[in-house]
Amino acid sequence: MNMNYTADELAFRNEVRSFLEEKLPADIAAKVKSGRRLNRDDHERWQQILSKQGWYATHWPKEYGGVEWSAVQKHIWDEESNRYGAPRVIPFGVSMVAPVIIKFGTEEQRQYYLPRILSGEDWWCQGYSEPGAGSDLASVKTRAVRDGDHYIVNGQKTWTTLGQHANKIFCLVRTNTEVKAQEGISFLLMDMDAPGVTVRPIITLDGEHEVNEVFFDDVKVPVENLVGEEDKGWTYAKYLLTYERTGLAGIGNSKAALEHLKGIASRQRKNGRPLLEDPTFAARVAQIEIDLQAASMSNLRIIASVEGGGVPGAESSMLKVRGTEIRQAISDLARRALGPYAQPFPEEELQDNYDGDYLADPHGAAVSPQYFNLRKLSIFGGSNEIQKNIVSKMILGL
Amino acid sequence: MDFTLNEDQQMLQDTMARLVRGEYDFQKRLEVEEAELGFSEAFWNQLGELGLCAVPFPEEMGGFNGSGVDVQSVMTEMGRGLCLEPYRQTVILGGGLIAQAGSDSQKDDWLGRIATGELRVAVGLQEPQSHYNLDDVETRAEASGDGYVINGRKGVLIGGHAAHLIIISARTSGDSRDRAGLSLFAIDPEAAGIERRVYRTMDGAKGCDLFLNDVQVGADALIGTEGAAGEAIQYQSGRAIAALCAEAIGAMEESVNLTLEYLKTRKQFGVPIGRFQVLQHRMVDMNSELEQARSMAILAANVADDEASAERDRTLSAAKNVIGRSGQFIAEQAIQLHGGIGMTWEYSLSHYAKRLIMINHQLGDDDFHLERYVSLLEAG
């Protein structure tokens, strides 16, 4: 047993740190660290920087412009990029549709779509969930009917994250209603600006516009936009979901969030001293820190097994559950740290050019909205109840 | 022992429930929240006209001589309607402080107008450093001429942006966190030296922080005996805690009802999701939390007007601790069981969840009241 990084891995970590110190824009890092929302330009700037460095497509084969980082290298990146306040890479193109196109698409599709993802020309969003298909994803009803060289698509997708910025959407559509639910699904690539596509914002409880409904009304999609075989989309969808799940544990993000919480708690006061020194609050913070340490070790053990040739399977479901619980608990504590000041929402403090006094804390304004926003963590990417079903079935054989 | 409401109490509850149902449906609530004032002046006036603002006051002050149980009926329905009007601040806390500590002329001046809804009051007992400790007061009032000069900052005055009268605590003697040396002052929000930083709150209300810079007040601004306000502050915040508990029950009941209905109607995998045992058990837990909370809200209502004692305060802390925890459990699980739809602005559930979480940030969260419960045990 050896729990240390190799010399090569340590060198890689130094390279990552130098890169982040030099290239991560300070304004973007400041936004990330204070929990403020990033705009489209922030995401695009960071995407361009990563792309230029060649570190955007970390898991693609080199022949398509990827870097083929090892699991340990990806872990180092996760820890360091979060620590420095780098934005989360929007995963829908580079980490979700791309692996499906690489594995199941035609060479023509690879040559067309992958460079456009690398360059940032295409912004993808995910057309999986529907009003009637959430946890039961295989019950998608959006219909694609073959008509000569086209499919005619009708239906509705929902919870489409950042769909308002996207020019492409990958969709699960029903091409066959005669067979079992899972057997009549196809995987289609579509243009968001095609006639018949309508995007309607969904405002969430924190007042933000992050997700959308997408409606399809007789949208014509060329048949060459089908990935793999017709009616075999469920296989590709599941392949993508394992990619989605890895990384949802968000260990690096939780470590950064814990430091952020400690910062707030060291500035807030209770009974004349920093809240972080209050026995009750300190114990709550310590408990989360300990749980995070355990989850981090579990994460490393899974990474090591992948490095040794194993495949992360249902273990990533377990990590998703624990990881999201921990991240939510940190956001709960940050809210508690503000005491009565968790109530005000001084929105002006979240503006880029705000130079006034802070009502409670330099990072106070984003705390309560973030607590509410992060309720999504235990819902999306397969709800935590669904993840437990997977663990129960695949690991425990129940 | 009888846990049913008597005829008068039942009538009061029916009146309030009918009023909220009729005047404050969810669409209306969204409009009220978005309006500049942050609450409905029309609804506030109705509360006054129907005598609901008079509920807890003695008859000789134009009141109904109502008990904590009567207040509970009003507040539970306000919680059910997610009502944004400053009833707790004005009638319970503000009116309560004046009724307990005020001089005869102050009572004559203010209580009658509070009872009719004419006078809206905001109360500032917290400060940026105080967390939830109401003895942690650094705002100072120095004697000056025949009045006082006040300097300091009071935090998170819900309704403070639209109050006609603001009551604050300030230190006239003693050190930070001494209970002795606290005094109450009535402040004109428009007085020279006062600045208000107004904001909206996470749960749709509006409030402000109050910055006092050499604010001059007369001797008649002092409410009660100089330096002896600590007891009234503790006692009346206890009544406000009971009111908050009652309000939380209304919001919890609606959250539980909406979730139960959703489990029965939302279908996945070909069946209503309420058929899945893991969700059944979660729903059972939510219901049990509600029952526990309801019990403690009833207890709180029944001791709220008891004579001041460590036992009364301990009971109120116990109630607020339970409400804080059960409110968070119900808010979080109601969202979880709904999935994405539970997180949307246009569905009432998310607003109940936000109110329940924010109730835990008013007058002390579950951690604060657990500590207070222990310290009161030691004191008793």
Image (spheres, rainbow, N blue to C red):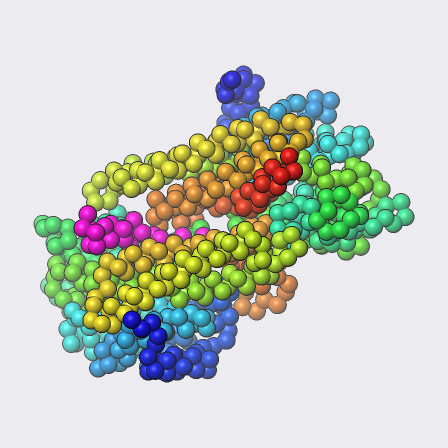
Residue B329 seen anywhere in this rendered image of the structure: yes
Q: Is residue A306 magenta?
A: no
Residue sitting nearer the eye, A339 or A241? A339
B331 on left or right of B19: left
Say above or below: A165 vs B60.
below
Q: Residue at x 48, y 34 (%)?
A: B293
Q: Please, what is the dominant secondary structure of the magenta stretch?
A: helix
Say above or below: A376 vs B232.
below
Quadrant where the N terminus of chain A lies?
bottom left
Percent position (x, y) of residue A104? 16, 69
Q: Is residue A372 magenta?
A: yes
Say above or below: A238 vs A99.
above
Say above or below: B316 vs A228.
above
**Residue sitting at the far right:** B145
Q: Residue at x 31, y 52 (%)?
A: A383
Residue sitting nearer the eye, B75 or A378? A378
Percent position (x, y) of residue B268? 24, 44
Residue sitting nearer the eye, A95 or B363? B363
**Magenta segment boundaries in residue numbering:** A369-398
A2 on left or right of A263: left
B319 on left or right of B146: left
